[in-house]
Image (tube, rainbow, N blue to C red):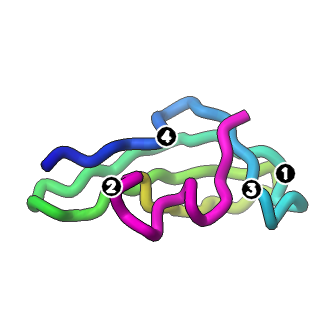
Amino acid sequence: MRPRLYLKTGDRVSHLRYFYWGTGRVVEEKHSTVDGGFCMVKVIFEDGKERFFINDLENHGCCYYAGLRLI
């Protein structure tokens, strides 16, 4: 089964709980070549830190459920 992706490169995001991170931009997507593997995105926020999130809406750990929202 193909993953249901939430974010793509270039999307701008914010976090519901960590507003002090500022806004972020998705700069990289990584997709597993193994069936059932993770899809990840790298987001750089205004605080200068890179953070990685799961990007599959079928996974309960998806960045959407963790609080990441599109701007």
Check the image and report above or below for 4 versus 32: above
Instruction: Give whichever of discs 1 and 2 has the lower sequence position.
Output: 1
The crowd level at tag 3 (other Cα within 10 Å; few <14, some 14-19, many 20+) is many
Q: Residue at x 62, y 60 (%)?
A: 50
Amino acid marked by disc 1: Gly
Q: Which residue is mark 1?
A: 22
Residue 50 placement, left or right of 16: left
Residue 7 bears which disc, if any? 4
Disc 1 to disc 2, how far (Cα)? 24 Å
Q: Nearer the viewer, residue 67 or 52?
A: 67
Q: Quadrant of residue 38?
A: bottom left
Disc 4 to disc 2, how far (Cα)? 10 Å
Q: Which residue is mark 3?
A: 15
Residue 39 bears which disc, if any? 2
Check the image and report above or below for 14 versus 59: above
Disc 4 is placed on an element classified as loop
Disc 3 to disc 2, how far (Cα)? 19 Å
Disc 1 is placed on an element classified as loop
The crowd level at tag 4 (other Cα within 10 Å; few <14, some 14-19, many 20+) is many
